Amino acid sequence: MDIRITVICENTVGTTLPAIGEHGFAAFIETKTGNYLFDTGQGFSIIHNAKYLKKDLTSIKKIFLSHGHYDHTGGLTNVLNVKQRVGVYAHPDIFSKKYARLKTNGKETYRYIGIKHKKEYFEKRGAQFVLNSSFSEVENDIYLTGEVSRTTDFEKGDSRLLINDNGNFVSDPLLDDQSLILKTKQGLVVVLGCAHSGLINTIKHIMNHFKDEKLDTIIGGTHLSFLKEDQLDRTISHLKRYDFKMIGASHCTGLKAAARLYQEFENRFFFANVGTSIVIN
Ligand SMILES: [Fe+2]
Ligand SMILES: [Fe+2]
């Protein structure tokens, strides 16, 4: 085994083990050079699920955070409680004040959906932040996209996602959204948090950096759940241009978009929920 990626936090559970589902995402990555954690879920399930899935959180060399939303960063404190000193790689905007605009009974409300604590709080518990906004190699053959270039004309961000800018709610550019890339003999393996930059923007951004590589597997949250039919059509038709081997949909993909991905990609599609494990040789 060269690389194994196991989903340890996700909205649903796909194993008979007594694991917990929660709205969120985290993946445990085992490689020849060490183990890594990508995202941390909300914090309710990571410790419990890691135990039952036999993934030792004290063994992780680095933590990568896809963006600041609570459902990806909420478990950071829990992980630091067991791991203590560890490098945490993320974009500086993970600490921006992120909100979601909700409509309840016809009324607009705003809910805080950002990271739970300030940087210093995590640092006191052992987090050694490496904040970077550009594409970077974070380990041998492991890369973070940094800010993803928005190059497609159809991938508009989710207008419900906002930041509080001195009392004013404005659209969150989500520049902190980034994905992890593992360069393997089989090709590139891409691990997504929510792909708020747009699934196609993310893939295009990655392939621009790896012109001679082929795309092998995409796994994680695709944030396709809020798309109108025409935008989803365009996403699918662009996705078909990439000769990837497998796509594992998680989290904010949503059932409707996941069903569509299955319809389009059939045996190249899988659900990636708690307990799903992929091995790349
Ligand atoms: Fe999410
Ligand atoms: Fe998100």
Image (tube, rainbow, N blue to C red):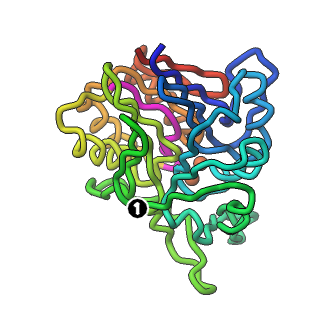
Which of the pair 1/236 is nearer the observer?
A: 1
Q: Amino acid at mark 1?
A: Ser
Q: Is residue 133 left or right of residue 149?
A: right
* Residue in view at x 45 percent, y 18 percent: 2
Q: Dot 1 surroundings within 10 Å: few (below 14), some, or many (20 or more)? A: some
In the image shown, does 194 or 31 lie closer to the viewer? 31
Q: Nearer the viewer, residue 214 or 58?
A: 58
Q: From what the image shows, is residue 132 above or below residue 6?
A: below
Examine the rendered structure and indicate whether residue 260 appears above or below residue 172. Answer: above
Magenta extent: 216-226
Q: Residue furthest left?
A: 212
Q: Residue at x 18, y 38 (%)?
A: 211
Residue under the image location 70 percent in, 28 percent down: 56
- Kindly tell me whether mark 1's CB lies below 8 Å from ligand 2: no
Quarter location, residue 281: top left
Classify mark 1: helix, strand or loop: loop
Q: Is residue 230 in view from this perspective?
A: no
Q: Position of residue 10 (x, y in %)?
A: 66, 35
43 up-or-down from 123: above or below? above
The residue that label 1 is drawn on is 133
Q: In x, y percent, where is residue 35?
A: 56, 31
Q: Quadrant of residue 277?
A: top right
In the rendered image, residue 126, in percent from the top left (x then y), is placed at 70, 55
Q: Is residue 204 visible?
A: yes
Compared with 250, 231 (above or below) is below
